[in-house]
Image (cartoon, grey):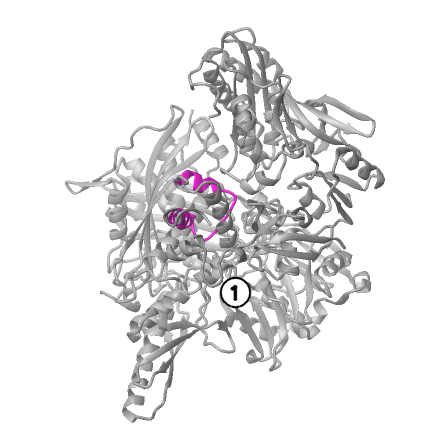
Amino acid sequence: MSTRVLGHNVPKKDAATKVRGSRKFPQDFDMEDQIYAKVVWSEHPHARVRKVDTSRAEALPGVVRVLTAKDVPVNEYGIIIQDQPVLVGVGDKVRWLGDRIAIVVAESEKVAEEARRLVEVEYDQLPVVSDPREAMKPDAPLVHEERGESNVFRHIKIRKGDLEKGFAQADVVVESYYVTPYVEHVYMQPDAGIGYIDEEGRVTVISSAQWPDHDQRQIAPMLDLPQEQIREIVPAIGGAFGGREDMHIQHLLALCAFCVRRPVKMVFDRAEVMTRTGKRHPWYVKYRTGARNDGTLTAVDIEIVSDSGAYASTTVPVLEAGTSFAAGPYVVPNAKVDAYAVYTNNAVTMAMRGFGTTQSAFIYEMQMSKLADALGMDPVELRMKNLFRDGSIALTGHEMPQGVGIREALKQVALAAGWREEDGHWVRPALGRPSAPHKRLGIAVACGLKNVGYSFGSDDKSTVGVQLTLDEAGQIARVTVLSGACDVGMGVQTLLAQIAAEALGVEYDQVRVSLVDTAKVPDSGSCSASRMAWISGNALVQACQEALQKRDQVLLAESGETFVEAEFEFHGRTVYETTPFDADTGLCVPHFAYGYAAHIALVEVDIETGETEVLKFWAAQDVGKSVNPAMIDGQSAGGVHMGVGYALTEEYIQQEGVPKTRYLADYYIPTVMDMPHEFRSVTVEVPDPTGPYGAKGIGEMTTLPTAPAILSAIHDAVGVWIDQFPATAERVWWAMQGKK
Amino acid sequence: MPTLSMILNGRDVSVEVDPGDLLVHVLRDKLGLIGTKVACGEGECGACTVLVDGITVTSCIYPALKAQGREVITIEGLAEGGQLHPIQQAFVDVTAPQCGYCIPGMILSAKALLDQNPHPARDEIKEGISGNICRCTGYYQIVEAIELAAQRMAEEGGAE
Amino acid sequence: MWDDYLFPQSVEEALEMLQAHGGKARIIAGGTDLALQCQRGRNPARVMVDITHIPGLERIEERDGSIYIGARVTHAQVAASPLIRSRAAVLAQACGSVGGPQIRNVGTLVGNVVNALPAADGAIGLFALDAEAEVAERTGRRWTPIADLYAGVGRCTVDSCQAMITQLRFRGLDDGDGSAFERLAKRKALILPILNTGVALWTDDGAVRQARIAIGPVATTPFVATEAAQSLVGRAPGDAEVAEAARLAAETAQPRYSLLRGSAEYRKNMVEVLVRRALTRAVALVSGEEGGNADS
């Protein structure tokens, strides 16, 4: 489909203010009469609070108030399950080091900092459970004894076909045990904001967030107020990557404002973000794959143990999403999958780019790479033998809807990296010589797929509004898009402006997108699940069509009216109905839209040190419709950056519930010097007939295949599989010693 | 309280500071220049980068009084009135900023680089921003923007 | 954080200021380590005596057969100095690998030594060159070998509340000599090393007259592999000699398990690899294979 505004690069709506430094992030705001808050954090990963003495803190000059559990009207919250205390009171338990005991509010940040050290807390320590596999055992200490008799709080089962028969048909079986690591989001802007009472008496929070309307829905019951009495304003977000889907600070700011009735500012330092906020789920996975000699997959048998940390957060949907894709974009007729969500006293694990599908992509792609190796088959060829097409039956027994672009993505990335199709077979490129005698080259491919939007029968929806200002001739002079879509950096506001311009037949520069303020814009849902383009885009297209109809009516009526507005609430289920996992078979229609990616990595491994360098990287993403090529390339590169870190350098280490990774100096995300020397992003467009102008989504699929591509390339180079990663130099070195 | 006097973005500025103040907090909290960002507070990421006498420093661990008598440039000092500096314009044109939090620091590192070396090779550009961490972009478009800025500035007849 | 921030205009004035504050004042140069330590409550000093305005401490120069580096000189200046690059390449490379550009612009080489961490890159370069430091106290000034400055992890024998280091000196390398620095780290910038090594070979007619091999962090202080270095003396080193020296270095270095840096066995093996690579590069310079003394 050819489009006028979409598919072209335009200056991002927020770019000028960001290069000037004038765009205000939450910590850049100050209000008159403001005071400052600091959190008193738990000192133990598992303990009962015996005593809280705030007297010394309260006596410090400049301290306004010390809030404790008794100041919270309803002291529980949670993004899905309300299993979290806002502040832990005497007699209650802290379950990880990110639990909070108190909040000190003072006239200056300095006094607040000093005062929080003066709050004295006594604990009765409890046994710590820090390995989810241990936590599953019947005699393990319980993290939430009030919720049941086991730390396992969700078990997802898939039973498809006949597993025994499937393995009997297999000529080759690959069996592995994988451990995927914790990851820290490292959004560059630390959590911060101001809570205050606005001119209409609403408890108002200025902060960065991904889901402001859901924050409202959690804060309101916590303060025992109606939802309309809570307001959240999101001025700019310095990165999120899923890490702001749960509230880290918004509810605390709301509580402060509610109790103190003055503007209260709070800024987390990096160590607080690093050690007291959520992480990506580690998974412990047993994976057995069977295939015929010709490469056709016959069966998979998978067990996943997911460490939920101290609270549920989004562990269940993450596990559900990941489990629904546990066999990847491949046709597998016989499958048994068991996935467990387990409480521990480790860091709370939460949404992070990929939402379970990143961990899945690692496990299914490493299995495919191992299979290709075992069969002596080209890795692209093996995948092509099994990849989905439109209508293929997926793991959960449903037909893949139209728009399956994975074959096209794989084909394009393979050709870009030098693969050839010869006599119906895929042939890998020759690699040339390594840069030194102690180095080895390796190349490998990996695929990934991700759902777009919310799944398993949930009513995913987005409401977007549009306002038209007409000139005297009745032509559209200016457009304002009203949306709750939070721009975490990917450019959703630019995207919506382009879609509006396209749909209304105006110029991009005539469109502005409103600030996200829950009091003034509709609920567009969460900025997550790569959903904004598809669902808010669809809502916006409909709203624009309605607005145009209203404009036409205005013109017909010759009323002289110059302002028209329309709003549309778009439901994902109107396009495609999804269903939850069947309790016994796990069969379901999990998702309504998908995005696909395929990556290839060329690496060079130092056989003496184990160091891996990524020389070249090709990333293909099927986005359905390219809305803004430069923004897509940026998302692609950003996803690869996270994947390179996941694969090679990022380790978040905890021991017995205590993080050893405490400062940014301890956690190594790739610098510019660590990125692939050459990078090529390939955008594939296999339209999704249900997406706006055929668009899918992109935010997450760009990071899924990266790590398995790199780790498979390491095997291609030096013949070792790394099943517990990151593949640090030392891990690779030990693996090579094991081979000798 | 001691007085810090510096030439800030081309103007003489004097401000009272605490002896223990770090430069980033004086800029942000006492002088209202919020373009310089705090991302780590450890000198580990470069988001707080400013120029002192033309060289880059991480202002979050730089004692404010070290800037006594020196020329300090923050991101606010680059644009001339309404007109973006060529480096800023290049970042916009290449669509480099995503969340934008690392960008002021990146731009100042780019400026220091191009002031020293107006025709840098790609490796030299990467070296020049090796102390600036970004989590959104993967750095490629940032490097592209700096290459474009260098090219344009050379065409205009030299760095500003 | 601090009660006062002072700029003495001479070394004498700096020492007077230290004395006047009776142990509560200390020397600060770039402050890239110190500011953070104070902020985190790990250093009790309340008054900073900033030496970066003192004339005379900013020089890198050759005098009387030795190369001198003043206390104000930053890592960036060392790394960029034509004199250091040609006459002490190991040090230029070492300083060039510290942190990132912003840290190198402000942090000083002398400060790196005073911070006394065994992983400090600049210090490893100085150990390779068998450098000395001039310590200035109320009683006068004295030169001391760099190894004598290290009392343990993070502990310098010079008490920065009472004394200061004013300059470093070492004998540079000449044509026909060779030096090199190697580093192993978990990413390529903004990171402390898992392991680093600096080697220097002084020669007469192609035969090694003196050799130094410095390794960090494998002990509580920078480690000098004396036996390994000694094994090279008296010969024109080839691959076999280099391999033997590297083996000896690995044998004598005793790294222990570290959560941050890795297992003892891996680190020991990497000592052999890095020392062999550094010596190979230094030897190539000795035999003129890399065309002169320019740093790699």
Q: Residues within 10 Å of mark 1 (few under 14, many from 20)?
A: many
Relative to B39, say whether A84 is above or below.
Answer: below
Write down the quadrant of residue A535 in the picture: bottom left
Q: Residue at x 64, y 70 (%)?
A: A31
The residue positioned 24% from the left and 43% from the top of the image is A381
Which quadrant is the N terminus of chain B positioned in?
bottom right
Q: Which residues are magenta?
A: B122-150
In magenta segment, residue A156: no
| Residue A701 makes an appearance in the image | yes
Foreground residue among A96 and A704: A704
Q: Is residue A455 visible?
A: no
Residue A291, above or below C211: below
The residue under label 1 is which amino acid type? Ala
Counting from the top left corner in percent of width and height, residue C240 is at 47, 11
Residue A685's x, y, as percent?
26, 58
Q: For residue B131: magenta?
A: yes
- Indicate whether A366 appears above or below A611: below
Q: How many numbered callouts?
A: 1
In this rendering, would C28 be left or right of A313? right
Q: Main secondary structure of the magenta part?
A: helix
Query: Which of these two is toward me, A551 or B26?
Result: B26
**Residue where numbered disc 1 is placed:** A209
Q: Residue at x 64, y 41 (%)?
A: C32
Placement of A177 over or under C266, stated as above or below: below
Q: What element does badge 1 sit on?
A: loop
Horizontally, is C5 left or right of C193 in the view? right
Q: What chain letter is assigned to the residue under label 1?
A: A
Of A454 and B75, the residue lying toward us: B75
